[in-house]
Image: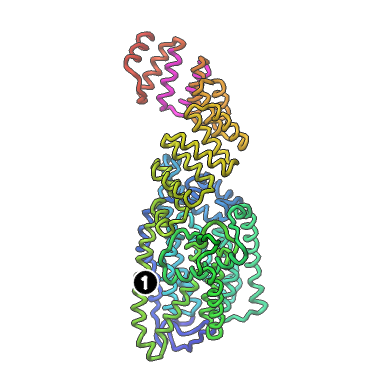
């Protein structure tokens, strides 16, 4: 085994090799391990506030809170996640990791499962744990790639660890896929470095298996074969037939997962694509390419959401967008020229661009021009260039450079403090939906999506006035969103402003009359003010659009009951009970209708079923007592009245005394 000793090595940056940490010195074996440990501790301290954060209302409901498959026993959901897409994508390992967190969180807490609100602490802890592992893996990979350049490895991993743009990937529970796929991605690169060292096919097989796990975590890992080629380029391998052939299995895997993702997302993407010309797509992609670099160097104004630019009356966007393709070409040209001198900058940019190209919005999806989470993997390329630059400054023998290196070190330390402070503050932005969307609104007042999500949260918390103001703010920016008019109607109805609610629902239906939920909501609003004919028409429209929807039958049955049309109410409740026979409330409502038309045996059967489902239902006991009283079985009436009282149902003493006397 070669001793870990340092000697003077002639720097050969064009070949990607060069002097180790400090030319002519020996690095103690413990020092790299100590540096990795320091990185982990520093990162953990900066991200501690994230462990106190809650779930957001941005995809966390889809991934966790409302995901019934995730809450199934692991023996059921593991096969499901490997055979079915989830949350509009195919990432089974991500979903399984979230499922494990869920089951560990709700263990011995049965009430949590019913409420669907697990504690977010474990979810955030797991995401942070993987981020810490990724910091160490990136350090190890750069250490191996650069042939033990300690400064390069440390700076690259340090910037990756504390950069505030990475908070989104770590502090947002729905982005578990980012930290998880990166973990397997970097592990695969480390194993590949062992393959380059040992030339044994088992290491290449291990690389492939880790690549597969990365693909199972997030399809974005399809870029891995290109990163391998970039690594070969930096490492100085000649692109022989063998080098190309050994990558073919990786490209095949990438192609398979690319096809799977395209098939799953095809119909979703079609509904979210913005209509832009070819030049506009190039313009916006170029702008994003530039802004990712700018914010990675100077992360001011980072946000969870970056909307497309506003268009003036003439249909123009700000000048910077028109200049962006030229600036991007100049950057690419400069990188190409640098390759004649050294492979460092070109490799760093290859890593950066390869990791980013699929999300540069050449095919615009959604309403965001860029996203912090897309910098998680790609940023390592630019951080590598920075690390190499600092390393070269400390290795340089030029007097001017040597005289300035401590000034450079001081400036870099200040820069690190700046990044760390911003990262620490950014973790608090993700504390809850209000802090998240308020921050977006502060930075992008025209980001109507932020008003929508914050309004939804306020509405769910019955903060009616705040929700109303957010929805109205949304509609001042964008007036053609049927969903927001529907949400506004719901808020008005919560505040008992029924006329305004009906107006909002009607405006929603003018924009889009194909949503059965809006017809249902307006039907309920009409029934609230006893406009039953209008309500009946809307119920029928809702059923025509969504035949068999139980929520429609539930609401209509309540209206029938209020109208005294008990037989029709019973028919609707029977449909609902046949669909969900475990809900005691439906038996309670149907039993009441039977009671009103004096069908006592049927009514008694429904109330008794309520007790089967919930033995502590005092209301059901009271109703059973009332039935026995009607059929003059006063002894049983008295017994059930006592039971209702014991279950804290308000039973008056005079009634108990009367039943006691009658029952003997």
Looking at the image, which residue is at 47% across and 37% down? 501
* Residue 29 counted in the magenta span: no
- Considering depth in this image, is 41 or 353 the residue closer to the camera? 353
- Within 10 Å of the Cα at label 1, are there few (<14), some (14-19), or many (20+) other Cα atoms? some
Label 1: which residue?
416
- Taking the view exactly as shown, the residue that stands out farthest to the front is 314
Quarter of the image where one finds residue 23: bottom left
Residue 500 lies, with reference to residue 75, above or below; the image says: above
Residue 478 lies, with reference to residue 605, above or below; the image says: below
Its colouring scheme is rainbow
Task: Inspect this view and state whether residue 37 appears.
Answer: no
Q: Which residues are magenta?
A: 600-629
Looking at the image, which residue is at 37% across and 24% down? 649
* Residue 610 counted in the magenta span: yes
Q: Position of residue 410 (x, y in %)?
A: 33, 78
Q: Position of residue 151 (x, y in %)?
A: 41, 78
- Considering depth in this image, is 177 or 402 the residue closer to the camera? 402
Badge 1 marks a residue whose secondary structure is helix
Q: Quadrant of the C terminus?
A: top left
Looking at the image, which residue is at 38% across and 53% down? 435
Q: Position of residue 448 (x, y in %)?
A: 47, 53
- Considering depth in this image, is 458 or 98 the residue closer to the camera? 458
Q: Position of residue 353 (x, y in %)?
A: 55, 71
């Amino acid at each position: 085994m070669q001793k870990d000793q340092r000697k003077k090595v002639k720097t050969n940056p064009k070949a990607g090799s060069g002097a180790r940490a400090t030319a002519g010195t020996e690095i103690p074996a413990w020092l790299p391990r100590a540096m990795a440990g320091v990185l982990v501790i520093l990162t953990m301290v900066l991200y501690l506030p994230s462990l106190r954060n809650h779930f957001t209302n941005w995809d966390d409901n889809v991934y966790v809170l409302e995901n019934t498959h995730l809450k199934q026993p692991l023996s059921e959901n593991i096969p499901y996640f490997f055979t079915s897409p989830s949350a509009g994508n195919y990432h089974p390992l991500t979903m399984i990791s979230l499922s494990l967190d869920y089951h560990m969180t709700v263990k011995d807490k049965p009430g949590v499962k019913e409420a669907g609100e697990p504690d977010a602490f474990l979810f955030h802890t797991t995401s942070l744990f993987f981020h810490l592992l990724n910091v160490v893996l990136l350090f190890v990979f750069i250490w191996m790639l650069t042939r033990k350049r300690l400064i390069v490895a440390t700076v690259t991993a340090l910037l990756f660890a504390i950069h505030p743009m990475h908070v989104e990937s770590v502090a947002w529970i729905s982005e578990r896929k980012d930290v998880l796929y990166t973990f397997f991605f970097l592990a695969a690169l480390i194993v590949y470095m062992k393959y380059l060292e040992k030339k044994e096919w088992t290491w290449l097989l291990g690389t492939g298996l880790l690549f597969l796990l990365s693909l199972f975590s997030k399809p974005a890992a399809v870029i891995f074969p290109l990163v391998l080629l970039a690594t070969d380029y930096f490492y100085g391998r000649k692109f022989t037939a063998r080098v190309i052939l050994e990558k073919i299995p990786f490209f095949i895997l990438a192609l398979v997962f690319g096809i799977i993702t395209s098939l799953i997302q095809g119909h979703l993407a079609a509904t979210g694509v913005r209509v832009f010309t070819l030049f506009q797509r190039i313009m916006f992609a170029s702008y994003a390419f530039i802004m990712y670099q700018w914010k990675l160097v100077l992360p001011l104004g980072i946000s969870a959401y970056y909307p497309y630019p506003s268009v003036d009356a003439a249909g123009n966007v700000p000048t910077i967008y028109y200049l962006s393709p030229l600036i991007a070409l100049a950057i690419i040209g400069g990188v190409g020229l640098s390759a004649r001198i050294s492979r460092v900058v070109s490799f760093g940019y290859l890593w950066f661009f390869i990791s980013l190209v699929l999300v540069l919005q050449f095919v615009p999806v959604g309403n965001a021009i860029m996203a912090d989470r897309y910098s998680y993997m790609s940023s390592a390329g630019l951080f590598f260039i920075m690390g190499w630059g600092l390393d070269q400054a400390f290795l340089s023998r030029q007097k001017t450079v040597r005289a300035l290196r401590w000034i450079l070190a001081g400036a870099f330390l200040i820069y690190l403090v700046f990044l760390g402070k911003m990262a620490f503050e950014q973790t608090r932005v993700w504390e809850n939906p209000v802090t998240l969307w308020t921050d977006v609104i502060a930075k992008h007042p025209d980001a109507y999506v932020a008003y929508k999500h914050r309004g939804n949260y306020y509405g769910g918390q019955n903060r009616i006035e705040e929700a109303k103001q957010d929805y109205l703010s949304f509609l001042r920016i964008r007036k053609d969103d049927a969903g927001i008019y529907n949400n506004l109607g719901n808020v008005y109805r919560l505040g008992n402003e029924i006329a305004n609610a009906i107006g909002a629902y009607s405006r929603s239906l003018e924009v889009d009359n194909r949503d059965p939920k809006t017809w249902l909501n307006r039907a309920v609003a009409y029934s609230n003010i006893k406009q039953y004919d209008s309500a009946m028409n809307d119920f029928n429209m809702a059923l025509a659009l969504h035949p068999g929807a139980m929520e429609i039958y539930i609401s209509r049955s309540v209206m029938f009951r209020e109208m005294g049309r008990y037989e029709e109410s019973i028919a609707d409740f029977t449909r609902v009970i046949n669909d969900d026979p475990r809900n005691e409330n439906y038996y309670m409502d149907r039993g009441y209708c039977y009671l009103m038309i004096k069908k006592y045996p049927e009514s008694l059967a429904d109330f008794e079923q309520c007790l089967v489902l919930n033995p502590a239902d005092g209301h059901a006991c009271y109703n059973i007592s009332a039935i026995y009283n009607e059929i003059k079985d006063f002894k049983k009436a008295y017994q059930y009245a006592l039971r209702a009282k014991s279950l804290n149902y308000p039973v008056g003493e005079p009634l108990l005394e009367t039943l006691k006397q009658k029952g003997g």
